[in-house]
Image (cartoon, grey):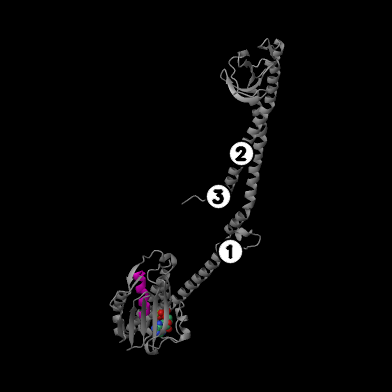
């Protein structure tokens, strides 16, 4: 079985992922903003220094000179944290002053300024260059100033750290709020579960809808539907058990009575007579328990175990019909078979279909005319039909629906029975996607029970 997923955990996970993603995006944006401002601040100083150094470039006798007082140079180079470099060079004279190693920025226009990142002595630096043409020398001088990046990265890191603490606090608060929100939001569901859990197993009354959010109403409505059907089924089941117990009592009481009579019989003929009656009562009880069992077997649970296979109604009718010939002979009934040569295939369970047909034949032989006719018929086709017809007294039209009810028997009936046969027939037909029709027999005499099967090939309901 799959482990059930938690709605709460799922919601929190989704919210959490979104929050963390947002935070990461925000952190990235903050990082670049911090970097930008750190660069902005320190670049300004570098640019100013470059301009100041450029002012110290002069031309004398056609030669470029760079004279910066030593003190000024010391002031320029003094920095506790970063290392500062400069270089003055010209197109014609080449290197003039500063650090030879310092690379130049790509060529710039005269008076222009260029910023970039470069490296010196294996260290990354920020490099600013400007280009000037001093006096009338006609030689272009490039002045470059560079500075390592320690102050910048320190500042960036400080800005970031300063922002991180509140961000993480924010995330934590958001997660806690989300957890509370989700918990509160799902409370109606947990309340509902507690309410249903606390129920007594016999309480199948509907779950109250009031005070429930709209989203859970559909669920509760479905649960209530189910409860209603369940309680109906329970009622039917209880009634059935009560009826069954009541029905069994009659033949069993008769069994007791006849057994006592046999015991006390003064002579053999009386004893014989009592034993015969005993035999009949036992038979009745056996038949009743058989039918109760047959009905119990049509329970959805029991039925899920049956195997559905193609069954030929023609051969089924032949086989089951044969079993009933002795009974027909007993009552001197002309028992006929009207089946086609071709098979009539339905999908079903052979044993259950036999049970169904047996009940119909039993009724026809029992309630039809003695010395009359009973016919078994099979009609093939897209909707195969299986019928049993007799020429007995028939069934009044207004009783034709009721005779299928459990334990119902036509008033005034004499033959022994318990009124379950047709209920079984109907249940079994339903399981085979078939319906049972009751009509009069040929020439409007007797009765005819026809089982009409659904489209062959369509699947059966389970
Ligand atoms: N072929 C028939 N002809 C006349 N009445 C019938 C026929 N089949 C059934 N019935 C009536 O329907 C009632 C219910 O039949 P059934 O459910 O088989 O119960 P049971 O046979 O145990 O009485 C019977 O008692 C009988 O009155
Ligand atoms: Mg019957």
The dominant secondary structure in magenta is helix
Which quarter of the frame holds ligand 1? Answer: bottom left
Mark toward the start of the polypeptide (2 vs 3): 3
Q: Name the residue under label 2.
A: 25
Residue 269 placement (x, y as % from top left)? 31, 85
Establish if 295 lies above or below 75: below
> On residue 221, which mark appears?
1
Quote the CA–CA distance across marks 1 and 3: 23 Å
Sooner in the amino-acid sequence: mark 1 or mark 3: 3
Residue numbers of the magenta segment: 347-361
Q: Which residue is drawn at 68% across and 9% down?
A: 61
Label number found at residue 202: none
Residue 102 magenta: no
Pointer 2 residue Cβ closer than 8 Å to ligand 1: no
Which of 332 and 161 lies nearest the eye of the viewer?
Answer: 161
**Quadrant of image for the C terminus:** bottom left
Does residue 371 appear left or right of residue 195 in this picture? Answer: left
User: Do tag 2 and tag 3 residues touch (Cβ < 8 Å)?
Assistant: no
Question: Can residue 263 be seen in this snapshot?
Answer: no
Hey, which quadrant is residue 165 in on the image? Answer: top right
């Amino acid at each position: 079985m799959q482990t059930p997923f938690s709605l709460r955990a799922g919601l929190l996970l989704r919210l959490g992922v979104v929050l963390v993603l947002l935070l990461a995006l925000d952190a990235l944006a903050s990082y670049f903003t911090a970097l930008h401002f750190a660069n902005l601040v320190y670049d300004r100083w570098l640019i100013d220094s470059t301009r100041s150094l450029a002012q110290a470039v002069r031309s004398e006798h056609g030669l470029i000179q760079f004279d910066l007082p030593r003190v000024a140079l010391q002031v320029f180079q003094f920095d506790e944290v970063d290392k500062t470099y400069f270089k003055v060079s010209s197109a014609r004279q080449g290197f003039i002053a500063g650090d030879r190693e310092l690379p130049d920025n790509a060529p710039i226009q005269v008076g222009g300024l260029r910023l970039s990142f470069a490296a010196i002595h294996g260290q990354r630096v920020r490099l600013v260059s400007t280009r000037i043409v001093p006096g009338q020398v006609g030689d272009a001088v490039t002045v470059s100033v560079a500075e390592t990046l320690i102050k910048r990265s320190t500042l960036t890191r400080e800005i970031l750290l300063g922002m991180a603490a509140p961000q993480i606090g924010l995330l934590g608060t958001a997660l806690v709020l989300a957890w509370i929100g989700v918990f509160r939001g799902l409370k109606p569901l947990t309340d509902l579960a507690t309410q249903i859990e606390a129920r007594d197993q016999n309480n199948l009354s509907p779950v109250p809808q009031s005070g429930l959010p709209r989203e859970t109403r559909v669920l509760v409505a479905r649960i209530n539907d189910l409860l209603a059907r369940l309680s109906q089924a329970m009622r039917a089941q209880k009634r059935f058990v009560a009826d069954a117990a009541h029905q069994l009592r009659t033949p069993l009481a008769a069994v007791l009575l006849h057994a006592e009579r046999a015991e006390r019989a003064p002579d053999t003929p009386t004893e014989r007579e009592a034993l015969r009656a005993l035999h009949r009562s036992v038979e009745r009880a056996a038949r009743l328990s058989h039918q109760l069992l047959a009905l119990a077997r049509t329970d959805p649970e029991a039925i899920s175990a049956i195997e559905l296979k193609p069954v030929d109604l023609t051969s089924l009718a032949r086989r089951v019909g044969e079993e009933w010939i002795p009974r027909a002979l007993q009552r001197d009934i002309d028992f006929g078979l009207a089946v086609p040569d071709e098979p009539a295939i339905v999908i079903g369970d052979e044993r259950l279909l036999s049970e169904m047909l047996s009940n119909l034949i039993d009724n026809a032989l029992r309630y039809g005319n003695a010395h009359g006719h009973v016919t078994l018929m099979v009609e093939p086709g897209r909707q195969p039909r299986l019928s049993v017809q007799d020429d007995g007294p028939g069934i009044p039209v207004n009783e034709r629906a009721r005779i299928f009810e459990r334990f119902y028997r036509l008033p005034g009936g004499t033959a022994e029975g318990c009124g379950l046969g047709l209920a079984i027939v109907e249940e079994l037909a339903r399981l085979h996607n078939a319906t049972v029709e009751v009509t009069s027999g040929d020439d409007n005499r007797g009765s005819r029970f026809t089982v009409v099967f659904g489209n062959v090939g369509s699947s059966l309901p389970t």
